[in-house]
Amino acid sequence: MNKNKLVFSGVQPTGNLHLGNYLGALKNFVALQKEMECIYCVVDLHAITVFQKPEELKSNLLETVAGFIAAGLNPDKSIIFNQSSVSGHAELAWILNCVSRIGWLNRMTQFKDKAGSDKEKASVGLYIYPNLMAADILLYKATHVPVGADQKQHLELSRDIAQKFNNDFKCKDFFPLPEPLIPKNVSRIMSLRDGTKKMSKSEESDYSRINLKDSADDISKKIKKAKSDSDQIPDNLKALEKKPEALNLITIYSEISKISLEKVLNEMSGKEYSFLKNKLAEHLISEITPVGKEVKKLLADKSHLLQVLKKGKEKASIIAEENLKNIREKVGLI
């Protein structure tokens, strides 16, 4: 394990984790904990940038932690905690609000996407949450952050803020400039109903996604009804790229079976999509249902999950408070 590298990542407590979360983030988290020191945070302060029902937020937080552990994260190897339990996140976010520039935030495309056409009604928190994200990372002086393409802009902002802090307070290299960790072979998992949209909990139809808690029967039905194509499976990626739903099914099969897209096409070309769907359902049932059963088992013992969070908070707080002492000193706070 590389002791000089520290990974930080935050996941919003949306509840009802699905295949996109599992393949896009959780499996990578598990792999990283074998190589580096890792801190994984359930970012409940980020979640409240849009209104959350309090009881649902608590429930979703615990379900996210259960998903972490069921997927293979080890609380004895990785620090797992919820963001709001360590007050240093909010304290450093305010300090960085005063370092970050309005022009930088105005360039953040995700705010425009999430706020929609009536941005005047969006919360201030939604606008400035990239600064809180920077605080999450810099509070622990993380060196590496696993990100998808949609979060890369926010990590670049974190680097800009870290650099400006170091320059403003004449403390070269105090904050490391965090590097993105973008998995080379992980593809975006799209909706089973619309191959142009990411798989999401917020999509109305439950048939658009494979949930981690789905039964074998659920998975089989959803894959059978997944939108595909009436033609036979092509033998090259160029042809497949014109068929987003078909490409998505091939991509999921590639990810879950650990076979390259090219080899999958060699295996599947000329066959009907029903053949692919049967094979895909088998692989998904084999890998996903044990995770779902473990999630349900963990949720039945909430005291254990709360204990995991408590221990994680204690470990995270030690690192956070030590760094905050130095930050306050550099800023001139007593």
Image (tube, rainbow, N blue to C red):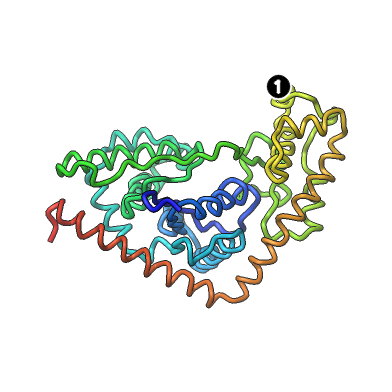
The residue lying at 53 percent from left, 71 percent from top is 305
Residue with the mark numbered 1: 238
The residue lying at 71 percent from left, 39 percent from top is 259
Q: Nearer the viewer, residue 330 or 110?
A: 330
Residue 241: name its quadrant.
Answer: top right
Residue reaching furthest to the front: 1
The residue lying at 69 percent from left, 49 percent from top is 209
The residue lying at 42 percent from left, 67 percent from top is 312
Q: Is residue 11 left or right of residue 199?
A: left
Residue 292, image x and y in percent? Answer: 68, 62
Query: The C terminus lies in which quarter of the figure?
Result: bottom left
Q: Nearer the viewer, residue 229 or 70?
A: 70
Residue 320, image x and y in percent? Answer: 30, 60
Image: 266 above or below 172: above
Q: Considering the numbered disc 1 on the image, is that residue within a helix, a strand or a loop? A: helix
Which amino acid, mark 1? Answer: Lys
Residue reaching furthest to the top: 238
Residue 314, image x and y in percent? Answer: 37, 70
Mark 1 is surrounded, within 10 Å at the Cα level, by few (under 14), some (14 to 19) or many (20 or more) other residues, namely few
Residue 92, image x and y in percent? Answer: 27, 54
The mark tally for this picture is: 1
